Image (tube, rainbow, N blue to C red):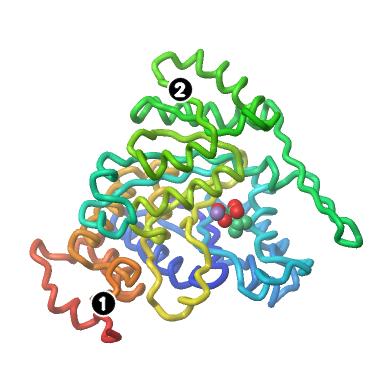
C-alpha cells in the first residue's frame, strides 16, 4: 500500500514524539512492504515564528492533498499568559479541524496491567476500564460567535449546534458501541442548556434505531464524578466539543499517564491523528517525553488505512515495552528510558529484532544516567 502522510510536528515535545511515530511507521512499511511518503509542514507557535501565521496555506494544501495527517502538539507558554495576543498557536489547530471538517474526535482510554499504581485511583476501581470518548470537534462554543467589548467590560462565546452536526457524530458513535460493549452514554447539561436538550432529543431518536445498544444520559457534572468513582461503567461516551475536551483530559489519568493516549479526528476531509497530550514545554528538547501517545496515534492511522495487522503489531510492541519496564520518566521517574530509545525499541520489535528473551543489559546501556 502506498500512502502520503502530512507530518506536523508542531510545538514543544511535538517534534520529538512525532519522530518516534515516524520511525515506527517506517518500520511497519519495511516489514509489510508498504510505501509511506511524508510531507513535513508547519503549524502552531513554530509556524507563527517562521511565517507570521499559525496555519500557513501550504500546510492546509498538503493536508488536503495527502491521505492522513500525523500531528504532534501545539502551544507555547508565551501565548498562554497573554490574553491580548491576536495570533495564537491554537488557532492553527482549530482552523485545520474546521477546514478538514474533522467533526469526530475519537479518544480511547484503556488501562495497562502493571501501571495501575500510577493512577490516582485505587487499582480496584480501574478494573475493566475500557472506554472511547466521541467528542464533537467542529461545533459548539469553540466555534460560535465571539464578542469582546472594546472597553473589556464584557465578552461572550456563543454555543450552537445544528441537527446535522449532532447526528453526524452520533451515528458513528452508536456504530462503535455496536462493535464494543454495546453501551453509549450521552453526556450533556440538558437540565440547563438548550443545545444539550437538542442533543438529547436527536440522540434519543437515533437510540430507538439501535435497540441492541443500552443508551444512557448523564449530566456532565455527574459524568465528571462518575469517571472517578466508577469509570468501568463507560463504554462509548458521546459528547459535545467542550465537555469532551474536559472529560477526555480527566479520563486520561485513569490509564496512568496522559502521555499514553492517542486520538483520531475524522470527518469529511483528511483524517488527523495526534496524541492527546499537549506541547509540555518544560520537557521540550530533553528526550524525556512519552512517545507512546504519538506511536499509538500512528496505530490508529494504520487502522484507518485498513492495515489492521500492522496496527495490532504496533500496539503489541507498546504493550511489550510497558510490560518490560521500557518506559519514560512520566511512568518510571528513576529508571527511565529516553524518548528516542523507546522509538528505536518499538521499531526493533516491529522489525523482529527483539529476541524472545530480551538482552536487557544491552538496552540498559542506553538508559538514562540522570537519576
Ligand atoms: C485538545 C486541545 C485543543 C482543544 C486546544 C489545543 C485548542 O486541548 O485537542 O484537546 O481544546 O481542542
Ligand atoms: Mn484538550
- Residue at horizontal 73%, vertical 36%? 160
Task: Bin the neighbour count of mark 1 within 10 Å (Cα to Cα): few under 14, some 14-19, many 20 and up.
Answer: few
Asked if labels 2 and 1 touch by Cβ distance under 8 angstroms, the answer is: no
Q: Is residue 97 left or right of residue 216?
A: right
Tell me the number on the disc at residue 202.
Answer: none
The image position of residue 27, as x and y in percent, is 32, 62
Q: Is residue 31 left or right of residue 88?
A: left
Between discs 1 and 2, the one toward the N terminus? 2
Rendered view: 49 above or below 369: above
Q: Which residue is mark 1?
A: 334
Q: Quadrant of the C terminus?
A: bottom left
- Residue at horizontal 46%, vertical 24%? 216
Secondary structure under tag 2 reads strand
Rendered view: 67 above or below 62: above
Secondary structure under tag 1 reads loop
* Residue at the farthest left position: 357
Task: Bin the neighbour count of mark 2 within 10 Å (Cα to Cα): few under 14, some 14-19, many 20 and up.
Answer: many
The quadrant of the picture showing ligand 1 is: bottom right
The image position of residue 55, as x and y in percent, is 69, 62
* Residue at the farthest right position: 150
The image position of residue 148, as x and y in percent, is 85, 55
- Residue at horizontal 19%, vertical 66%? 353
Q: Image quadrant of residue 180?
A: top left
- Residue at horizontal 42%, vertical 80%? 286
Q: Is residue 278 left or right of residue 154?
A: left
Of residues 149 and 140, the one nearer the viewer is 149
Q: Image quadrant of residue 347?
A: bottom left
Of residues 111 and 101, the one nearer the viewer is 111
Q: Which residue is mark 2?
A: 215
Rendered view: 204 above or below 286: above
Separation (CA) of disc 1 from disc 2: 44 Å
Amino acid at each position: 500500500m502506498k500512502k502520503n502522510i502530512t507530518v506536523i510536528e508542531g510545538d514543544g515535545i511535538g517534534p520529538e514524539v512525532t519522530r518516534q511515530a515516524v520511525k515506527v511507521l517506517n518500520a511497519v512499511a519495511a516489514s509489510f512492504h508498504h510505501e509511506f511518503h511524508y510531507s513535513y509542514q508547519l503549524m502552531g507557535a513554530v509556524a507563527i515564528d517562521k511565517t507570521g501565521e499559525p496555519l500557513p496555506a501550504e500546510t492546509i494544501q498538503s493536508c488536503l492533498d495527502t491521505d492522513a495527517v500525523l500531528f504532534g502538539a501545539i502551544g507555547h507558554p508565551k501565548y498562554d499568559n497573554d490574553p491580548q495576543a491576536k495570533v495564537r498557536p491554537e488557532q492553527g489547530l482549530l482552523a485545520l479541524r474546521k477546514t478538514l471538517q474533522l467533526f469526530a474526535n475519537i479518544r480511547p482510554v484503556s488501562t495497562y496491567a502493571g501501571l495501575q499504581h500510577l493512577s490516582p485511583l485505587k487499582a480496584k476501581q480501574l478494573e475493566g476500564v475500557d472506554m472511547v470518548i466521541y467528542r464533537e470537534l467542529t461545533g459548539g462554543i469553540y466555534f460560535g460567535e465571539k464578542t469582546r467589548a472594546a472597553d473589556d467590560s464584557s465578552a461572550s462565546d456563543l454555543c450552537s449546534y445544528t441537527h446535522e452536526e449532532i447526528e453526524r457524530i452520533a451515528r458513528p458513535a452508536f456504530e462503535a458501541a455496536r462493535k464494543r460493549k454495546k453501551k453509549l452514554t450521552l453526556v450533556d447539561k440538558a437540565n440547563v442548556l438548550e443545545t444539550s436538550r437538542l442533543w438529547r432529543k436527536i440522540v434519543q431518536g437515533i437510540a430507538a434505531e439501535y435497540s441492541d445498544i443500552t443508551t444512557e444520559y448523564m449530566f456532565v457534572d455527574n459524568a465528571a464524578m462518575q469517571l472517578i468513582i466508577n469509570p468501568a461503567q463507560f463504554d462509548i461516551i458521546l459528547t459535545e466539543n467542550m465537555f469532551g475536551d474536559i472529560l477526555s483530559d480527566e479520563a486520561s489519568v485513569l490509564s496512568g499517564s496522559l502521555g499514553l493516549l492517542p486520538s483520531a479526528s475524522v470527518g469529511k476531509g483528511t483524517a488527523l491523528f495526534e496524541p492527546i497530550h499537549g506541547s509540555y514545554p518544560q520537557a521540550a528538547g530533553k528526550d524525556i517525553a512519552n512517545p507512546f501517545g504519538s506511536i499509538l496515534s500512528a496505530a490508529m492511522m494504520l487502522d484507518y488505512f485498513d492495515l489492521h495487522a500492522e496496527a495490532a503489531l504496533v500496539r503489541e510492541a507498546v504493550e511489550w515495552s510497558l510490560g518490560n519496564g521500557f518506559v519514560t520518566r512520566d511512568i518510571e521517574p528513576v529508571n527511565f528510558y529516553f524518548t528516542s530509545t523507546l522509538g528505536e525499541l518499538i521499531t526493533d520489535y516491529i522489525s523482529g529484532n527483539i529476541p524472545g528473551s530480551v538482552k536487557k543489559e544491552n538496552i540498559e546501556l542506553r538508559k538514562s544516567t540522570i537519576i
